[in-house]
């Protein structure tokens, strides 16, 4: 596109205008859509990871079906020993769940979303990394970094708690064996 625009003389005014419009559209839409799609993939990967934790470690734990894609795994996280009561990461991820739903089900348009008040509250809280323009959600690049950091903290807390539980189980086993031997 740039090369054709630089040729200049060989293009009609109509062709130049058309190419400039295409270039502007590409610049204005590609990056925002890339951020949205990256965010949606990140959420789906976290959801899949939580699903595997559930199936592998606590398959009998009931999910909260009415709590959305991520929130339904809250009992699973509690079952593996994660304290969510003071987790800023969990609260951010839960808010991002509403952002995900708006992006997927309403194409990021607040007027088509079921609960725009939740979205406005989240945007008000994190206005430096997410905003609303022309009734649509706009994610800054920093938003992706914040979500990634929150997801990593949540994952690390599960690994830590799982390791602690395994160590306690081994300790209990060792004490049980010790009692049997003596």
Image (tube, helix red, strand yellow):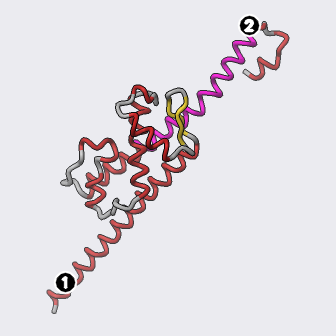
Left/right of residue 34 with respect to residue 79 in the rendered view: right
Q: Position of residue 43 (x, y in %)?
A: 42, 43
Instruction: Check disc 2: other Cα within 10 Å, few if <14, some if 14-19, many if 20+.
Output: few
Image position of 128 with respect to 177: above or below: above
Q: Quadrant of the N terminus?
A: top right
Q: Which residue was labeled with disc 1?
A: 177
Q: Position of residue 22 (x, y in %)?
A: 66, 18
| Residue 21 drawn in magenta | yes
Q: Are marks 2 and 1 in contact (CB under 8 Å)?
A: no
Q: Look at 42% across and 61% down and name the residue there.
A: 156
State the image quarter where residue 44 is shown: top left
Q: Position of residue 42 (x, y in %)?
A: 45, 44
Image position of 160 with respect to 10: above or below: below
| Circle 2 or circle 1, nearest the eye | 2
| Residue 79 drawn in magenta | no
Residues at marks 2 and 1, CA–CA distance in whole angstroms = 86 Å
Q: Which residue was labeled with disc 2?
A: 14
Start and end of the magenta stretch?
15-44
The secondary structure making up most of the magenta span is helix
Q: Name the residue furthest right.
A: 9
């Amino acid at each position: 596109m740039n090369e054709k625009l630089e040729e200049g003389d060989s293009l009609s005014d109509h062709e130049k205008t058309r190419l400039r419009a295409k270039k502007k559209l590409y610049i204005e839409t590609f990056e925002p859509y890339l951020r949205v799609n990256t965010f949606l993939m990140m959420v789906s990967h976290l959801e899949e990871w939580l699903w595997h934790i559930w199936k592998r470690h606590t398959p009998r734990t009931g999910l909260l079906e009415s709590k959305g894609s991520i929130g339904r795994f809250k009992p699973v996280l509690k079952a593996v020993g994660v304290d969510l009561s003071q987790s800023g990461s969990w609260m951010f991820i839960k808010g991002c769940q509403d952002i995900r739903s708006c992006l997927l089900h309403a194409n990021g348009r607040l007027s088509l979303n079921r609960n725009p008040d939740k979205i406005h509250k989240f945007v008000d809280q994190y206005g430096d990394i997410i905003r609303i323009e022309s009734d649509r959600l706009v994610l800054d690049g920093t938003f992706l970094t914040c979500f990634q950091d929150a997801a990593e903290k949540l994952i690390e807390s599960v690994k830590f708690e799982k390791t602690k539980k395994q160590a306690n189980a081994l300790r209990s086993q060792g004490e049980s064996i010790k009692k049997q031997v003596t």
